Every structure is written in C-alpha cells, then in structure tokens.
Image (spheres, helix red, strand yellow):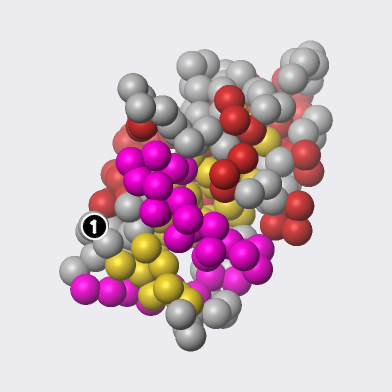
C-alpha cells in the first residue's frame, strides 16, 4: 500500500501520557486475553478519529509499531484514521490480509473471512494475525456461550453486528489450534478478546 504524505495539521493527538496510558491498555488487553469473554473498559484512552472506536484506537496505539504490518478495512483507507495510525504508530500498511500482523475491520458486511488472514505456520504459530472487529455493540445480539482456557466453566456474551457466519468461522478457527487467528471485538471504549483457543456455541448448537 503506497503511503501518501501526511498532513500533520489534521492529525488528532494520541495518548496524553504514552508510557502510562499504553501500559494501562496493555494490562487490560492481556487480562481480557487471559479471560475470554471479559469486557475491558478503555474509557481512559485517547479519543480516536472518525471511523475508529476508542477501544480500537487504544489497542493500535499500544500494540502497533514499525515492525507490525497492518491491514485496514477499505472504509478506513486514505482517511483521517489511516493518517492517525501511520503517524502515531509508524506501522506499515499492507493490502494483503495474509501478510498482516494486525487487522482492523469496521465494515462487517464486507469483512474478509477469518481464514483470509495469516494463520501462522509450524515454526511461528504465534505470528498469525490479530483481527480487531469493530462491531455495533458488545451486547444486544444473539447469546453465545464461550468455553476454553481462561474460562472456569462457561461464560455468555451477546455482541451485535457480526457477520451471520462469524461463530461458525470461529469454531473452525479454534479447531485448527495451534494455528489460527486471535480476535478482538471492540465497540465504543470496550473490548472482548477471543483467543484462538476459545470455543463458541450459539443457541441451538
């Protein structure tokens, strides 16, 4: 993806205190990864530009850097959000989903399948893509029961606005462990992590 010149006058601020804020976000994200289904609250993070939720922006400011190729939803390309990410994170952008370390998806109707992203390989299974899905809300949708490492028995979540076949994709993703992508669902200033080890059952399964 060709990088255009940045108009610095139009780029909004990132973290007010980059070290402390990124550490706080990192702790919340890691706790959510360790406890799938837990809702992380990132309301303390910087406001992100139009098209990007506060939670997605906070994760990007914390985890993206010059060594992490990022795939952006076409809806975010050549926008203020792309310029903000390039300036604050220094991350290279790629148009190839299979080459991305991270991906931000905002248009669920046109979302690539999870299998389109880097699944990792036998030598480096941990180098698969982390896919950040920006959904309508983390509640109000069909109830899904999660199980797996980090969940004592089961836990229920009900995110709204995901593709109709998303949970079937997640089950296929979990079945190929140790390969597969890790997923983060974000809405507003909140986040739920769904590592590749997490199994999800919808009502009626």
Asked if the magenta segment contains residue 165, the reply would be yes
User: Residue 178: x and y, percent?
Assistant: 33, 41
Q: Which residues, given as a range, are shown in magenta?
A: 153-181
Residue at point 48% right, 83% down?
203
- Camera-nearest residue between 17 and 113: 113
Image quarter (top left, top right, bottom left or bottom right) of the N terminus: top right
Toward the left, the furthest residue is 152
Would you place residue 54 above or below residue 82 in this image? below
User: Residue 52: x and y, percent?
Assistant: 65, 47
Q: What is the count of numbered marks?
A: 1
Q: Quadrant of residue 83?
A: top right
Residue position for label 1: 149
User: Residue 149: x and y, percent?
Assistant: 23, 57
Would you place residue 49 above or below residue 70 in this image? below
Would you place residue 130 above or below residue 155 in this image? above
User: Residue 110: x and y, percent?
Assistant: 76, 52
- Using a 10 Å C-alpha cutoff, classify the residue at mark 1 as few (fewer than 14 neighbours), some (14 to 19) or many (20 or more): some
Residue at point 62% right, 65% down?
165
Toward the bottom, the furthest residue is 204
Q: Is residue 127 visible?
A: no
Asked if the magenta segment contains residue 22, the reply would be no
Q: Is residue 27 left or right of residue 143?
A: left
- Camera-nearest residue between 97 and 155: 97
Q: Mark 1: which secondary structure?
A: loop
Residue at point 63% right, 49% down?
113
Q: Is residue 8 visible?
A: yes
Q: Is residue 44 left or right of residue 10?
A: left
Q: Quadrant of residue 180?
A: top left
Q: Is residue 20 left or right of residue 13?
A: left
Q: Is residue 189 left or right of residue 92?
A: left
Residue at point 61% right, 40% down?
116
């Amino acid at each position: 993806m060709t990088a255009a010149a940045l108009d610095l006058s139009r780029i909004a601020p990132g973290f007010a205190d980059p070290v402390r804020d990124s550490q706080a976000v990192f702790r919340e994200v890691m706790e959510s990864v360790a406890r799938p289904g837990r809702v992380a609250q990132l309301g303390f993070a910087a406001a992100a530009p139009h098209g990007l939720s506060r939670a997605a922006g906070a994760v990007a400011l914390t985890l993206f850097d010059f060594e992490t190729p990022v795939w952006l939803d076409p809806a975010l390309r050549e926008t203020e959000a792309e310029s903000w990410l390039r300036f604050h994170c220094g991350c290279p952008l790629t148009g190839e989903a299979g080459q991305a370390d991270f991906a931000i998806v905002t248009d669920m109707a046109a979302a690539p399948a999870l299998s389109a992203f880097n699944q990792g390989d036998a030598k480096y299974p941990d180098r698969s893509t982390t896919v950040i899905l920006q959904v309508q809300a983390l509640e109000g949708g069909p109830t899904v029961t999660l199980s797996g490492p980090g969940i004592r028995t089961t836990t229920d979540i009900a995110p709204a606005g995901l593709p109709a076949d998303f949970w079937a994709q997640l089950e296929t993703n979990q079945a190929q462990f140790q390969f597969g992508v890790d997923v983060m669902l974000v809405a507003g200033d909140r986040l739920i992590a769904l590592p590749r080890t997490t199994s999800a059952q919808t009502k009626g399964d």
